């Protein structure tokens, strides 16, 4: 369900955030994989976030340096370092939100599914600890393949008897960020005004941009829909190829994850709204039917892995 839910638009997120300012606004966030390519810039953005009072940085290596560096920024957020597996549970203590970018990224020629063998166990181990230490925390899963690591998370929480589907979120905000950017570029619009909902999962055709619901209202030709959809679905690969072996998206991902974290913390401040899919065009309806079996396959792979452990 978390994978197929429509994501809030930028304008809606801004409105929610404005309302949230009046509510509870201090939260503890644990960032797992904090010393990595996404982890470091994301830690910086979270240190600058007005909702975050405490930021626990956890990784299996290099955390003390990252935390010392970050702690010199003169923002109120308190930063603590947790380095190595033995400090994982302490890092999770009291967390309201756990953000997980721990795991290996793609190299050119690889699919996200090629990361499964390494990343499935990493995510499962982290979730087992979260289930024990902070079972009520919201979990934001960034680690790929998201279409399988989210079901692994769900199954691991079920096995621990603490599963709540509303608390498990696969982070596909980067697809929304990209869709907004590419549509603004293609149509000569101010990117600040553009909202494109994206639904489905986070790989290839399971990423389904709903261009017909773009705000402000824009008309696209069939050819434009095909080209924009293809670019949004393959934008991760565009970055992997440009980085030529040095990893995948990190800066845009950190930006997207920070935006997602801010929306979650606004939600924890008392905002509650479930968005439907809205009205779909004929090509979007067909895209939705095509993505379902593909998404189901990745979900089943995740469930099978989690149940075999
Ligand atoms: P990276 O290699 O730069 O960093 C990963 C970090 O995870 C490293 O610091 C590593 O030490 C740490 N790590 C490994 N095992 C760990 C464990 N058991 N516990 C804690 N930390 C551990 O990689 P990156 O570029 O930051 O990417 C991380 C993940 O995010 C990859 O799987 C990548 O595919 C994924 N990603 C997802 C999206 C998305 O849209 N959801 C976007 C970009 C990247
Ligand atoms: C992305 O969309 O940039 C991420 O999922 C990383 C990747 O491997 O493409």
Image (cartoon, rainbow, N blue to C red):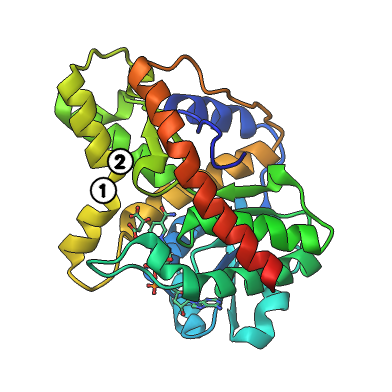
Residue at x-position 69% and y-position 47%: 167
Q: Is label 2 in contact with label 1 (beta carbons under 8 Å)?
A: yes
The image quadrant in which ligand 1 is located: bottom left
Q: Which label's residue is closer to the chain start, 2 or 1?
A: 2
237 lies left or right of 303:
left
Percent of width and height locating residue 61: 49, 85
135 lies left or right of 81:
right
What is the quadrant of the C terminus in the image? bottom right
Callout in the foreground (2, 1): 1
For mark 1, does the 10 Å Cα neighbourhood hold few (<14), some (14 to 19), or many (20 or more) residues? some
Q: CA distance from mark 2 to mark 1?
A: 8 Å
Residue at x-position 43% and y-position 38%: 291
Residue at x-position 45% and y-position 67%: 39
For mark 2, does the 10 Å Cα neighbourhood hold few (<14), some (14 to 19), or many (20 or more) residues? many
Frontmost residue, 303 versus 143: 303
Task: Tell me which corner region of the image, top left, top right, bottom left or bottom right, holds residue 141.
Answer: bottom right
Percent of width and height locating residue 234: 26, 47
The residue beneath circle 1 is 235
Frontmost residue, 76 versus 174: 174
In this rendering, is residue 219 above or below 15? above
Please tell me the numbered disc located at residue 204: none
The residue beneath circle 2 is 178
Percent of width and height locating residue 158: 78, 57
Q: Is mark 2 within 8 Å of ligand 2?
A: no
Q: Is mark 1 within 8 Å of ligand 2?
A: yes
Percent of width and height locating residue 231: 22, 40
> Can residue 67 be seen by looking at this rendering?
yes
- Badge 2 marks a residue whose secondary structure is helix
């Amino acid at each position: 369900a978390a994978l197929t839910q429509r994501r809030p638009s930028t304008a809606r997120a801004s409105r929610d955030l404005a309302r949230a300012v009046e509510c509870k606004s201090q939260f503890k966030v644990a960032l797992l994989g904090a010393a990595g390519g996404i982890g470091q810039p994301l830690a910086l953005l979270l240190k600058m976030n007005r909702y975050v009072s405490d930021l626990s940085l956890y990784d299996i290596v290099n955390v003390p340096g990252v935390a010392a560096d970050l702690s010199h920024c003169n923002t109120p957020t308190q930063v603590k370092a947790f380095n190595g597996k033995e400090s994982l549970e302490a890092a999770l203590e009291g967390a309201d939100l756990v953000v997980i970018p721990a795991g290996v990224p793609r190299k050119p020629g690889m699919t996200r599914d090629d990361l499964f063998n390494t990343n499935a166990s990493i995510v499962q181990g982290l979730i087992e600890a979260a289930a024990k230490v902070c079972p009520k925390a919201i979990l934001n899963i960034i680690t790929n393949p998201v279409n399988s690591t989210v079901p692994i998370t769900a199954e691991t929480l079920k096995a621990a008897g603490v599963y709540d589907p509303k608390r498990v979120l696969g982070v596909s905000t980067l697809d929304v960020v990209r869709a907004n950017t590419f549509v603004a570029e293609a149509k000569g619009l101010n990117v600040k005004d553009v909202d494109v909902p994206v639904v489905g999962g986070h790989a290839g055709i399971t990423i389904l941009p709903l261009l017909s619901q773009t705000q402000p209202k824009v008309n696209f030709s069939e050819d434009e829909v095909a080209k924009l959809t293809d670019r949004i679905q393959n934008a991760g690969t565009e970055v992997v190829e440009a980085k030529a072996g040095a990893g995948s998206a990190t800066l845009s991902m950190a930006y997207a994850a920070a935006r997602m974290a801010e929306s979650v913390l606004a939600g924890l401040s008392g905002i509650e709204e479930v968005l439907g899919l809205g009205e779909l065009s004929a090509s979007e309806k067909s895209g939705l039917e095509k993505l379902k079996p593909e998404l189901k396959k990745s979900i089943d792979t995740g469930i099978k892995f989690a149940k075999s452990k």
